Amino acid sequence: MLVAKNSGLTYWKVINYEKGKTNASQIIVMTLIILGVGIAGMYLAGLICYQKIPYAPSVMIAPVPVIFAVVNLLVLPVTTAFAEDGLYLGCGVNQIQNKAVAIIVPGILFALQHSFIPLLIDPLFMLYRFLSFLPLTILLCWNYHKNRNPLPIMIGHSAIDLMTAAQILATSMIPG
């Protein structure tokens, strides 16, 4: 938002949103791609780092107080799509002139951010998280650079975050 404000643009201009450009099939296809590539990335990273498929660390979907899980369910899917996708696609991909750099640098930074969620001071776990997201974030940056349409990516991103938040809520309501 600060980048948009400082440059005299709206948030929607920074991310190249065009009303009416997106249809339902684009959203469905991108959501399925995000889900599939996201899962494949986690499986591959689990194999590389832990020699396990699937690698499912218990800390990823751990119980929290139910009220926090409910707030997470309501807030996470919306805020991450606007914040992360706006930053890496709008401010990253859109601002870098060289095509390869415009895809690779924001993709690496996007994946790197997820290396610390949840924060465990364990280099192997951080590498696992980075490698889990790298194929997906590079693909998202490439797709955005090619199509300049953030909406399918943002909705797909929100969908997987909603699934994650729902899992956290479920484990928080019925721990063990």
Image: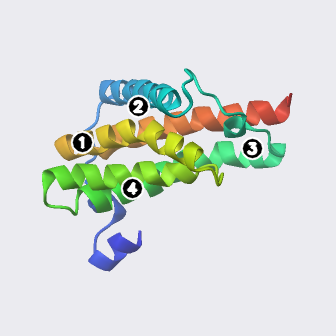
Residue at (43% x, 48% y) in the render: 111
Q: Which residue bears the numbered disc 2?
A: 34
Residue 89 visible in image? no
Q: Are marks 4 and 3 in contact (CB under 8 Å)?
A: no
Look at mark 4 in the image and give the residue it sits on.
Answer: 109
Looking at the image, which is closer to me, 16 or 165? Answer: 165
- Determine the CA span between mark 2 and mark 3: 23 Å
Earlier in the chain: of badge 1 and badge 3, it is: 3
Report the side of 54 relative to 97 (left or right).
Answer: right
Q: Residue 164, position in %: x, y?
A: 61, 35
Q: Is residue 75 visible?
A: yes
Tell me the residue at 71%/39% (across/down).
Answer: 59
Residue annotated with mark 1: 142
Q: Earlier in the sequence, mark 2 or mark 4?
A: 2
Question: CA separation, marks 4 and 1?
Answer: 14 Å
**Mark 4 element type:** helix
Closer to us: mark 2 or mark 3? 2
Q: Which mark is residue 69?
A: 3
User: In the image shown, does 57 or 83 lie closer to the viewer?
Assistant: 57
Identify the residue at image location x=29%, y=55%: 105
